[in-house]
Image: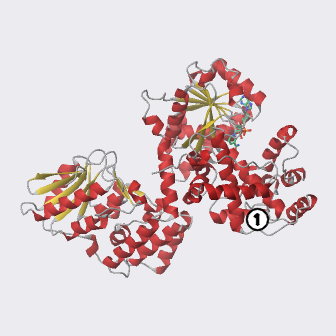
């Protein structure tokens, strides 16, 4: 027995308790202890049944992912499950909290499952780039059929206990006294061994399997591990279970050590570390009740929705009555659509909207303990608005700006107490996008940053902390990325080729499709405002300016880098753009050349790595792994590729340095190769 497993006897029933706080992760010690316990149980003639239960607040909420980077130590989970199945006496699993991944596979290896209301079960392995490795893909289909298994396993879906009961995944649901009920249940099953492995092989129509598979693959972005998961599930129709189990294990082991799984584990740990700062604090950060959002435009209304959905009271203020009404309508329409779509109960929507108020009067913001400004991106307007906020907000309230690029220190300087001012940079649409940049200014009190982190957590968002610098973290990296793509336009590539290469790599959208969607005029206005200070010797690509001068602002004007036919969202290639690009190359005397997709992706990644190294040297970002988190959660970077920092570490400093030398040469004046040490300081290690 190990310290992670305790046993006691209740007459003829052995109770095996897993104690590996905080989530009872299925570690080597847990597996060893379980195996020992099962052997003891089997050999004791006074015992007729056993119950496996989790100590604390949960059953086994998953395997210990930290172990996944090394060769797994014996005993492996399949051996533990085999011992349970081979034991002639009944073993019942008692589930509360979460029984996920290996925890749920263990439960599927038992003869019956009883759960406490509120429990969830599921096999989320695909989200970590792997597949279930201890029989999940072989036993679940024998219980609930092929199509449902494809949906649940390939979607990594968590199934609530009531639904699990309906599906037959669990056998009994109780409202209280899980252990007492589990012991009684186990006793009632004495002599009735009932293994999932002995059920008849599931069958399904080829057509319905195809439909379920296509749906799952689309949702899972066609990842190779999901293809494998489908293969394993469909194997159950014809393959004997032992061969199916061995095949599943082999595939699991291969995927586990692959780059995608490594990248996804890296992301998992990098995100988990974000909130660690909160846990270590002696005093709890300030919790907000009431939020005032200033500005009812695109961002203001989105931020208001994010806050309302998280349970806050929200006051939305706009100086312009028509803009305010527009924002209110947007918010009401959003919740109406959720009710109509069955995603939100009507009474919950009504209760939520009771927490929503709006105004054009500054005095009304006095109720708020956090004020978030989202007005026009103009320093004079921001100054005027912060003077009003300062004069009308509760003196204890924290004040945040959602500016994309402006200097928040300069904004804070207009207030009496700059220590309560910081940045909360949301991404559009704010009610959907996961990323928030929390911007720490010169005078910001650390408690304001801690409160911002906690706020982001309650919104269900992923925060990264940035210093107050132009473009913060994400937009700085994105600008370098876009610039590099524009260089490639001049050198010989076309927008559709660059977009396609990056989308095939895994980006949600290519940069030119994104530019057309957000509007080319916004970046144009920014370039014009910076024109006076731009170094004339630096390489400057004029293609976007030429498109803007022709009134091509993207989707909203029917043309940009692409042409948009009425009623369509995706653009088509436009010969006019091709000539603009060809002329731009000719004007600079550049002989256009062919690009491969691989070269396009490589240049983009290198440009991002270089910019991240600059951000690290300038101390804009504390831990460079935050840059990967920002790109994945706010910029459509493929999670399974880890992020530029992850890739840089795989590449090594020397190789990266050499590649950046080459990139600096092809990019020309203005591209500064960064000092790389900051990029290699944090490795987000597991
Ligand atoms: P928007 O034009 O849609 O909305 C701005 C709103 O502010 C308007 O409703 C306007 O009436 C109101 N407003 C202007 N002056 C005001 C004043 N003095 N008092 C009260 N209300 C006033 O703009 P947006 O796209 O929502 O952007 C708002 C801010 O968010 C900007 O700083 C922008 O840079 C930033 N931002 C925008 C995005 C985006 O994708 N749109 C993303 C992140 C951050």
Residue under the image location 59 percent in, 52 percent down = 645
Identified at 49% across, 39% down, the residue is 458
Judge left or right: residue 219 versus residue 97. Answer: right
Q: If the image is split into quadrants, where does the N terminus sit?
A: bottom left
Vertical comparison of 348 with 602: above or below: above
Residue displayed at 52% across by 63% down: 259
Q: Position of residue 123 (x, y in %)?
A: 40, 61
Rendered position, 131 above or below 276:
below
Residue 57 visible within the image:
yes
SS state under label 1: helix
Residue 172 visible in image: no
Say above or below: 211 vs 26. below
Look at the numbered disc 1 and say if its residue's Cβ is closer than 8 Å to ligand 1. no
Looking at the picture, tell me which residue is in the foreground, 531 or 370.
531
Query: Residue 612 placed where, x, y %?
Result: 65, 47
Residue named by callout 1: 496
In x, y percent, where is residue 240? 32, 80
Left or right: where does residue 565 sit relative to residue 432? right
The answer to whether 641 appears left or right of 552 in the picture is left
Quadrant holding ligand 1?
A: top right
Identify the residue at the far bottom of this view: 238
- Give the left or right position of residue 644, taking residue 115 as reference: right
Q: Nearer the viewer, residue 317 or 628?
A: 628
Count how many numbered circles sit on residues in the image.
1
Q: Quadrant of residue 150?
A: bottom left
């Amino acid at each position: 027995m190990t310290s992670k497993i305790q046993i006691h006897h209740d007459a003829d029933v052995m109770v095996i308790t897993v104690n590996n706080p905080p989530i009872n992760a299925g570690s080597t010690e847990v597996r060893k202890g379980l195996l020992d316990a099962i052997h003891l149980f089997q050999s004791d003639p006074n015992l007729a049944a056993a119950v496996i239960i989790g100590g604390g607040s949960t059953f086994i909420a998953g395997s210990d992912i930290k172990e996944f980077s090394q060769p797994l130590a014996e005993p492996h989970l399949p051996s533990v499950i085999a011992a349970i199945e081979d034991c002639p006496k009944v073993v019942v699993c008692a589930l509360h909290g979460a029984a996920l991944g290996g925890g749920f596979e263990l439960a599927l290896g038992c003869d019956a499952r009883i759960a406490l209301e509120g429990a969830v079960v599921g096999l989320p392995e695909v989200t970590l780039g792997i597949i279930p490795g201890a029989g999940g893909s072989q036993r679940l289909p024998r219980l609930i059929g092929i199509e449902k298994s494809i949906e649940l396993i390939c979607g990594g879906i968590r199934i609530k206990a009531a639904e699990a009961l309906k599906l037959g995944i669990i056998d009994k649901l109780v409202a209280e006294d899980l252990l007492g009920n589990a012991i009684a249940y186990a006793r009632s099953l004495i002599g009735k061994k009932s293994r999932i492995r002995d059920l008849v092989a599931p069958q399904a129509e080829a057509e319905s399997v195809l439909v379920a598979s296509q749906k799952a693959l689309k949702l899972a972005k066609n990842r190779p591990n999901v293809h494998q998961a489908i293969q394993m599930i469909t194997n159950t129709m014809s393959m004997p279970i032992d061969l199916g189990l061995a095949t599943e294990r082999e595939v699991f082991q291969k995927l586990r050590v692959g780059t995608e799984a490594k990248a996804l584990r890296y992301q998992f740990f990098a995100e988990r570390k974000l909130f660690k700062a909160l846990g270590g604090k002696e005093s709890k950060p300030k919790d907000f009740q009431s939020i005032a959002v200033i500005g009812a435009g695109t961002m203001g209304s989105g931020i208001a929705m994010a806050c309302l959905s998280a349970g806050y009271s929200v006051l939305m203020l706009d100086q312009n009555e028509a803009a305010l009404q527009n924002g209110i309508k947007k918010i009401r329409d959003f919740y109406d659509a959720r009710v109509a779509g069955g995603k939100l109960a009507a009474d919950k929507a009504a209760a939520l909207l009771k927490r929503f108020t709006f105004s054009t009067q500054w005095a009304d913001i006095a109720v708020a303990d956090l004020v978030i400004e989202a007005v026009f991106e103009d320093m004079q307007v921001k100054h005027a608005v912060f003077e009003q906020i300062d004069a009308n907000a509760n003196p204890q309230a924290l004040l945040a700006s959602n500016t994309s690029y402006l200097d928040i220190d300069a904004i804070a300087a207009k207030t009496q107490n700059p220590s309560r001012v910081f940045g909360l940079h949301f991404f559009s649409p704010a009610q959907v996008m996961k990323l928030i940049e929390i911007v720490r200014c010169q005078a910001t009190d650390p408690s304001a940053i801690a409160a911002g982190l906690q706020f982001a957590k309650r919104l269900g968002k992923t925060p990264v902390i940035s210093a107050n610098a132009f473009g913060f973290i994400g937009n700085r990296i994105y600008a370098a990325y876009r610039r590099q793509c524009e260089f490639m336009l001049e050198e010989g590539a076309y927008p559709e080729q660059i977009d396609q290469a990056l989308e095939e790599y895994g980006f949600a959208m290519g940069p030119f499709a994104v530019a057309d969607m957000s509007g080319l005029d916004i970046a144009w206005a920014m370039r014009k405002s910076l024109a006076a200070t731009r170094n004339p010797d630096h390489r400057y690509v004029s293609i976007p300016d030429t498109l803007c001068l022709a009134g091509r602002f993207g989707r909203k004007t029917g043309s940009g880098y692409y042409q948009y036919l009425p009623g369509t969202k995706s653009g088509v290639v436009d010969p006019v753009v091709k000539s603009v690009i060809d002329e731009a190359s000719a004007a600079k005397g550049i002989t256009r050349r062919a690009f491969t997709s691989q070269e396009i992706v490589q240049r983009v990644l290198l440009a991002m790595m270089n910019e991240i190294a600059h951000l690290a040297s300038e101390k804009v970002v504390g831990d460079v792994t935050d840059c990967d988190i920002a790109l994945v959660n706010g910029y459509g970077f493929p999670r399974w590729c880890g992020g530029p920092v992850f890739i840089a570490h795989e590449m090594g400093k020397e190789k990266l340095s050499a590649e950046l030398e080459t990139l600096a040469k092809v990019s020309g004046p203005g591209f500064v190769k960064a000092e790389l040490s900051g990029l290699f300081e944090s490795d987000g290690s597991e």
